Image (cartoon, rainbow, N blue to C red):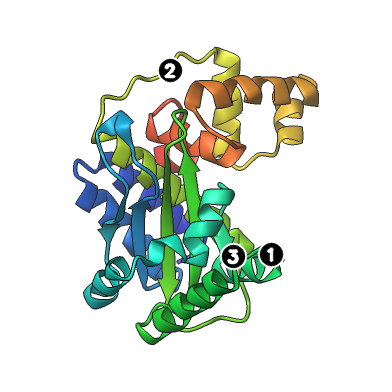
């Protein structure tokens, strides 16, 4: 199954899920098709907006003994993936987080040693390599995903990374929606047009040509879309618009 074919089914399953477990199961199935073994969704900071405290493993299928040990040791404070997630709300491979920490000349050597220990022990527990990502809402609350596989892979596919990020964003929004009422923002017809074409995989330049407008005008509409959907980038805004059923990709309608 290709990444793009699988994402269509995953979108449908997450959208129709009525529980966190059902949405998480849909997400995990998609990850399995792409060669990833486990996932953990964590509230990296307190979430007063939905009445939740920071908690590691809100939804997870990581090995129980590893999750328990991880929490007991307070590893969330020194885990390179968590540290990187708090700094940059973008999807990344774990190696990027590790290398970033190692390059930081101001890092406390003791913290670096503990961070290295987390990764080594994680590998022994069957979570050797993976992907991290985080999501920041309008209140500054941060949640994140750790997605793992048993063995370290030399080649990292950034296209697969982007589709996993889309699925993760849908799950994140579904999780929040199941804990608070969803208010669908009012979108102009032009904003809906831009979101609809973005959902079909069109670039901003292609959207401008299709709609007969200038490229800066497309970017202007995106800035308004980001504000209305509480999104930090184009991919996340499109994912939220699909989840909230503001737009529906043609591939899903067929």
- Tell whether label 2 touches label 1 (CB within 8 Å): no
Graded by Cα atoms within 10 Å as few (under 14), some (14 to 19) or many (20 or more), the crowding at tag 1 reads few
Which residue lies at the image location 32% right of the left edge and 29% below the top edge? 49
Q: Secondary structure at mark 1?
A: loop
Q: Return the residue nearer the eye: 161 or 231.
A: 231
Among numbered discs 3 and 2, the one appearing first in the sequence: 3
* Mark 1 lies on residue: 104
Q: CA distance from mark 3 to mark 1?
A: 11 Å
In the rendered view, does 43 fall on the left or right side of 237? left
Viewer can see residue 254: no
The residue lying furthest to the bottom in this view is: 124
Q: CA distance from mark 3 to mark 2?
A: 35 Å
Circle 3 or circle 2, nearest the eye: 3
Q: Return the residue nearer the eye: 190 or 133.
A: 133
* Mark 3 lies on residue: 97
Q: Secondary structure at mark 2?
A: loop
**Measured along the vertical axis of the image, is residue 226 above or below residue 86?**
above
Q: Return the residue nearer the eye: 204 or 172.
A: 172
- Tell whether label 2 touches label 3 (CB within 8 Å): no
Among numbered discs 1 and 2, the one appearing first in the sequence: 1
* Mark 2 lies on residue: 185
Q: CA distance from mark 1 to mark 2?
A: 41 Å
Across the whole image, how many numbered discs are drawn on residues? 3
Which residue lies at the image location 53% right of the left edge and 77% below the top edge? 113
Graded by Cα atoms within 10 Å as few (under 14), some (14 to 19) or many (20 or more), the crowding at tag 2 reads some
Q: Secondary structure at mark 3?
A: helix
In the rendering, at what x and y percent does residue 43 appear?
35, 48
**Measured along the vertical axis of the image, is residue 37 above or below residue 139?**
below
Viewer can see residue 199: yes
Q: Using the rendered view, name the quadrant where residue 53 is placed.
A: top left
Which residue lies at the image location 40% right of the left edge and 77% below the top edge? 127
């Amino acid at each position: 199954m290709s990444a793009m074919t699988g994402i269509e089914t995953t979108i449908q399953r997450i959208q129709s899920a009525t529980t966190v477990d059902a949405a998480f199961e849909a997400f995990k199935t998609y990850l399995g098709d792409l060669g990833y073994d486990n996932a953990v969704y964590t509230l990296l900071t307190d979430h007063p907006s939905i009445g939740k405290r920071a908690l590691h493993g809100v939804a997870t299928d990581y090995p129980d003994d590893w999750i328990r040990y991880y929490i007991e040791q307070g590893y969330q404070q020194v885990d390179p993936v968590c540290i990187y997630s708090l700094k940059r709300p973008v999807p990344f491979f774990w190696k990027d987080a590790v290398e970033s920490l190692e390059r930081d000349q101001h890092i406390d050597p003791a913290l670096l040693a503990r961070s290295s220990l987390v990764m080594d022990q994680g590998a022994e527990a069957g979570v050797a390599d993976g992907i991290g990502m985080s999501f920041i809402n309008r209140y500054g609350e941060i949640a994140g995903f750790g997605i793992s596989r048993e063995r370290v892979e030399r080649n990292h596919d950034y296209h697969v990374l982007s589709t996993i990020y889309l699925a993760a964003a849908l799950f994140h929004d579904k999780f929040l929606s199941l804990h608070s009422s969803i208010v669908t923002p009012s979108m102009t017809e032009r904003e809906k047009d831009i979101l609809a074409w973005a959902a079909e995989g069109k670039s901003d330049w292609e959207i401008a040509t299709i709609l007969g407008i200038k490229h800066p005008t497309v970017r202007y509409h995106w800035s308004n879309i980001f504000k209305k959907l509480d999104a930090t980038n184009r991919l996340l805004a499109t994912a939220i618009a699909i989840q909230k059923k503001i737009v529906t990709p043609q591939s899903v309608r067929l």
